[in-house]
Amino acid sequence: MANNSKGKRQRKIKTKLLLLLLPAVVVTIIALVVISSILTRQSLTEMATAQLDSSIANQSDNIESWLSSNLQEFSIAKTIIEKTHPDDAALLEILDSTYNFNAYCKDGPYVATASGQTYKAAESTKNFGGIQSEPWFKQGMTRVGLAYGSSYTSSDGVNLISATGLLKDGSGEVKVYGADLTLDQVSTIVNSGVKMESAASFLVDISANNTILAHRDPSRVATQITAEDSDPMMAGIAEKLQQRDYMTTAIDNYEVAFREIEGTDWVLVSYISNSVFLQDVAKLTNVLIITGVIAVLLIILIINLTVSKVISPLGHITKHITDMSNGDFTIEVNQESNDEIGMMGSKVSEFVESMRGMLSSINKESAKLKEQSNNSDKVSKSMYDASRSQADAMQNLNNTVDQLAVAVNEIAENATTLAIVVSDTRENSNQANESMKETVEISKKGRANMEHLSVAMEGIKNSNDELVNSINEVGKASEEITNIVGLIAEIADETNLLSLNASIEAARAGEAGKGFAVVASEIGKLAQNSAASAENISNLINDVGKAINNVVSQAELSARNIEANSDLIHAAVDTFDQIYQNIEKSNELIDLMIQDVQKVDDVASNVAAISQEQAASADEILETSHHMVEQANNITLSSQDVADNSHELANTSDTLTSYVQKFKI
């Protein structure tokens, strides 16, 4: 764990939080600046559009009022003429009297007949061409009431609009009454009526193919506005006029408003450049950018101070966790706050206390296991030495029984010979008597050796029982250690579950919980390492248990073999008793034979038969002795296995102790 941490470049939680929060803050402020600029632009555009609509409405009202006022003044003379039915002289007087009545009509009112007769004031400078071809006459012939017609150019080259209408003077002749207004005068009215600063207006006559009646640029007056105009704004306005779409709209970075002039076919167009009213947007955007930069700096400072204060306890917890990962459980973890971080510190403190207790218990149990394994090693060595002694004793017994078998065979041969030659020599009887006495002594010695062997087998059996008891105690200690290791595994699982819960809570907390997720992950890794160590200890203890079970099996096998050997030895002792009794009986018979030679034949025959039986018994005893030697050798091998297993158990205890000693408590 420590090596992996050193191999990777560590980054502080505060740095991570700053790297995560600052881009979000910067993006948010940029978004606010952009949104504010867009909203401000929209707001100013709406304000400018509303102001432009208000301006063009006021301007159109002024134009309508001016036109209506002029039309009313022109209608006065027409009304007088129609009511008085004057002759030609009176008509001229009326025209002379109304010549200066309207300041905008410099030539005053005039009258023309269908026959070409014209009437005007004496001071008027108006020139008449062909009456029937005059635009004003044609327009006047189409209406009774006085009204404005389309613009046209007079024979003098002056751009005019005329208010004309049929004159009903009672003469019965078709006459047209008219009065002229120059487009220069209309342009003056239009341009002077703009109420919105930096805005401009012009007047278009749509009935005359979109002829411009008034414009601030004199060169455009009396010209037609078309969709092919070189000015994109004018071309866009021409399209709107052709479509009869008079909604206020944006055309080529201009806000353009339209207003129809009531009583005419004229359309007033007012426009203003977006750059005029959007220059405040650029200023506001600069102010917002500067404010955003200052806000970012202040937020960086606030976040830095806040994060430093919030996560400062994590530094101590991180150091404690690092110490624990290095095996140091002597640390003291204090709860520095009452929030999640403080709760984490409290749980780490509880975990440290639990680990101290568990490691102390494991250390004590490991010491007990080592002591018991040493005792088992000593017992196994003692059993090995005893089994070696037993093997040597059994070998000696085997040699003794072998000698006994030879002696019994000799007895049988001597008894047979005695039966053949008993009648010939008494000296042979004496020799047989001596041999029988020697056999008695050998039987006594064999019987004593068998009793010693029985006592030695009982000692081996008792030692083997003590070894089994010691090994069982070691098994119980292993089970206790297994329970402790299980407790460690459960604590590790609970710690891992706590880490998982902390990670879930950190995920719910969003960006603010990512630091907690890192700490929870470290605790989870520590829990996994503790669980892995507990599993290793459990595996070692299982190996120790298997070794102990093997030792117990070997010890039980040795106990069964020892018990079987003890039974055989007891049987051999009984056999030796029977042999001894038979030999004593034979000795008595030989004595009787010496005393009563005459009965020697019958006695010799009996002795021969008995000697043959003894020979057969001696062979059985010899075979039994060989089997006991093999069993003794097996016991020696089993004792060696017990010694090896005890040594392995001691090594396992040392390994467990070395694992525990890696931790500081």
Image: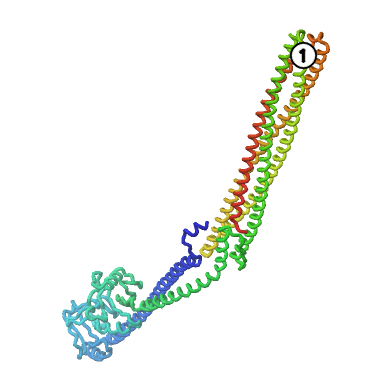
In the rendered image, residue 21, in percent from the top left (x then y), is placed at 48, 67
The reply, left or right, for residue 277 in relation to residue 464 is left
The percent position of residue 317, horizontal first and vertical second, equals 57, 64
Residue located 52% across and 56% down the image: 1
Instruction: State left or right for residue 99 relative to residue 37.
Output: left
Residues packed near mark 1 inside 10 Å, few (<14), some (14 to 19) or many (20 plus): many
Q: Secondary structure at mark 1?
A: helix
Instruction: Decide if residue 602 is in sight here.
Output: yes
Res 356 → quadrant: bottom right
Q: Is residue 173 visible?
A: no
Q: Position of residue 112 (x, y in %)?
A: 21, 82
Q: Amino acid at mark 1?
A: Ser
Give whichever of 93, 140 is nearer the camera. Answer: 140
Q: Residue 88: name its quadrant.
A: bottom left
Q: Quadrant of residue 391?
A: top right
Q: Is 61 in front, or is 190? A: 190
567 lies left or right of 310: right
Quadrant holding the C terminus: bottom right
> Which residue is under mark 1?
429
Residue 657 located left or right of residue 601: left
Image position of 488 with respect to 573: above or below: below
